[in-house]
Image (cartoon, coloured by chain):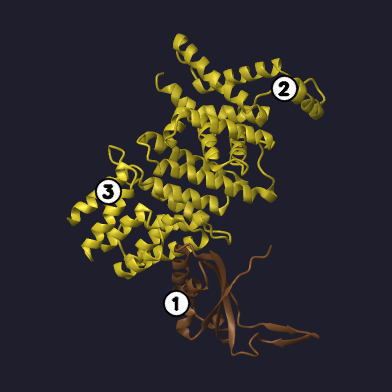
Chain colours: A yellow, B brown
Amino acid sequence: MEGLIPHLFRTEYRKIVSVLGKKFGFDQIEIAEDIASETFLTAAETWGLRGLPANPTAWLYNVAKNKAINYLEHHQVFDGKVAPALKREKDVAPEIDIDLSPQNINDSQLQMMFTICHPSIPIEAQIGLSLRILCGFGIDEIADAFLVDKDTINKRLFRAKQKLREENVKIVLPAAIELDERLQAVLRTIYLLFNEGYYSVSRNKTLRKDACFEAIRLCFMLVENQSTNKPDVNALLSLMCFHASRFDARLNEKGEQVLYEEQDTTRWDTDLIRKGEYFLNCSASGTRLSKYHVEAAIAYWHTNREDTPEKWESILNLYNQLLIIEYSPVAALNRTYAVSKVRGKQAAIDEAKKLELSDNHFYLTLLGELYSNLDNNEAIKYFEKALDLAKTDSDKNTIRKKLAKLK
Amino acid sequence: MKEFLLIYRREAVAGSLQQMSPEQLQNMMKPWQDWMGSLAAQNKLVDKGFRLEGDGNVVKPDSIVTNGPYVETKEAVGGYSIIKAKDLKEAGELAKGCPILKVGGSVEVRAIIAMD
C-alpha cells in the first residue's frame, strides 16, 4: 500500500478535481481540490485499518462522490445555483449526480486544460496550475521542479485561481471560432511544461521525467479528441516523443547532462522514436507550418546520429525556417552549429560574430568549440569566459572537460 | 532599433517563376533561405514579406490601366521584407548579403515611419 496511494494520487486526483470542478464551476475549484485531497486522506486511514478494497480506484470515486454530494446538500451552492438549473432542465425533483464515467472524466479534463491555459494568467502560473490540477503533482514537487520554495508556488497558484475567478472563466471547450487561438495557448503551456522537465536544473530525475511524460499525456488527450486533433497538436506530440526518447541517455546517474555526441544510443527509446515518426506523419496536413512542425522535423533528423551532408543541409534549412517563424537565442546558436557542419568552422565563426549574444555562456562555449583545432588560444579564451558566466555545475563541468582537451 | 523596408528589384522577367523546374526553384530559393535565416538568427528580421509575381497592372487617374508595373523603369519590384536595425547604415550593411545582388538586382532600403 505504501506506493499505491501516491501512485493513485498522481493518476486519480486530477480526474476527481476536474469532474468536481466542472460540476461546481471554477469559482469553487478549491472545494473540488479539498474534496479530492480529503478522499485520499480517508483512503489512507481506512485502507490502513481495514486493508485494501477490491477495486481501489472505484472506492476512491465512490468516496469522492459521497463527499461531493454531502457538500452540495449542505451548502447553498446546490440551492442557489445547481438546483434551479436542474429544475429548468427537467422540471422534476433534482437528484445530484456526480458523473465519474470515463467519458465525463476525459471531457472534464480536456475542458479544464483550456480553463487553466487561459491567456489572462501568466505562463508560470499556467504551468504550475497544470502540474497541480491536470497532473496531480504535490506543491512540494512543483516547488522542487521550479527550484523555488513552496510558499512562492502556493501564492502563485492562489493568485492565478483568483484571477481566473475574476475573469469568470468557465470550464468548457472554447467555441469553434476561438478554438484555434486558445489551442495555441494550451500547446504553448504543454510545450513549456515539457521543457521544464527536460531542461530543469533540478536534480530530481524522476520528477523531471514525470513532468515530461505528463506533458505528452496531455497532448495525447488533445490528439484523441476530434475537435482538437489538429496538425500542430500532432507536430508537438511528435516533437516531445523524439526528445523523450533520449531522456534516459541524456542524464547520467548523478542527474548530470550527457552531451548528444556522447550518449549511449542503445539507451534511446526506439518505441518513442516510432511514435514520434507516426505523429510527425499525422501532422503533415493543412497549410500552416507551425514552429512545432519545424522542431519535430529537426528532432527527427537527430534520431539518427550518423552525420551525412543531407542531414546537416536539412537541419540548417529547418533552423532557417524556425528562426523566420520565431526568434530564440537557442535556435540562433543551433543554426550556427549547423552552419559549421555544412559550410565549415570559419563560415560558422563569421555567422556567430553577428549574433550579439556575448553574455550568453552557451554562445561563448559554441565559439570555443568552433575555434578548437583552428585557433586553440582563441578557443581557450572563449571557454574561460563561458566558465565565468555558467551558472550550473553541470554546465561548468561540460566546459571544463572541453578546456582540458585543449590544454 | 528602427524598422526598415527592403524592396527587392531586378530586371523584369514576367512569368519566369512558373517556367522553373522544382529543382531550379529550389536552387533559386536556397540562398534566400540562408540569408533570411542569417538575418533571423541575428533577431533582425521583422517580416520575411512576400515575393511578387511578374505580371501586374498600374492604375492611373482617369481610369487608365496599363499592363505591367515596369512601364517606366526596366527594373520591377520582385518582393519585399521588413528588417530592424540601429540606423540606415546598419540596415544597408544587412542588405549587402541579399542574394538579389548576385543576379544583377538591387535592394532599396527605406526607414519605416510608425503610424499612430
- Residue at 19 percent of width and 57 percent of height: A406
Name of the residue lying farthest toward the top: A49
Kind of residue indicated by mark 1: Asn
In x, y percent, where is residue B107? Answer: 53, 79
Element marked by disc 1: helix
Q: Which residue is mark 2?
A: A77
- The answer to whether tags 2 and 1 share a subunit is no
Q: Is residue A94 left or right of residue A3?
A: right
Kind of residue indicated by mark 2: Val
Is any atom of residue A31 visible in this view?
yes
- Asked if marks 2 and 1 touch (Cβ < 8 Å), the reply is no
Q: Is residue A111 above or below residue B111?
A: above
Q: Which residue is mark 3?
A: A398
In x, y percent, where is residue A13? Answer: 53, 27
Kind of residue indicated by mark 3: Thr
- Residue at 38 percent of width and 67 percent of height: A351
Cα–Cα span, label 1 and label 3 = 39 Å
Badge 3 crowding class, 10 Å Cα cut-off, few under 14, some 14 to 19, many 20 or more, is some
- Asked if marks 2 and 3 touch (Cβ < 8 Å), the reply is no
Q: Is residue B63 left or right of residue A402?
A: right
Badge 2 crowding class, 10 Å Cα cut-off, few under 14, some 14 to 19, many 20 or more, is some
- The residue marked by circle 1 belongs to what chain? B
Foreground residue among A406 and B36: A406
User: In terms of sequence position, does the residue under pointer 2 or pointer 3 come before the other?
Assistant: 2
- The residue marked by circle 2 belongs to what chain? A
- Residue at 55 percent of width and 54 percent of height: A231
Element marked by disc 2: helix
Element marked by disc 3: helix
- The residue marked by circle 3 belongs to what chain? A
Q: Nearer the viewer, mark 2 or mark 3?
A: 3
- The answer to whether tags 1 and 3 share a subunit is no
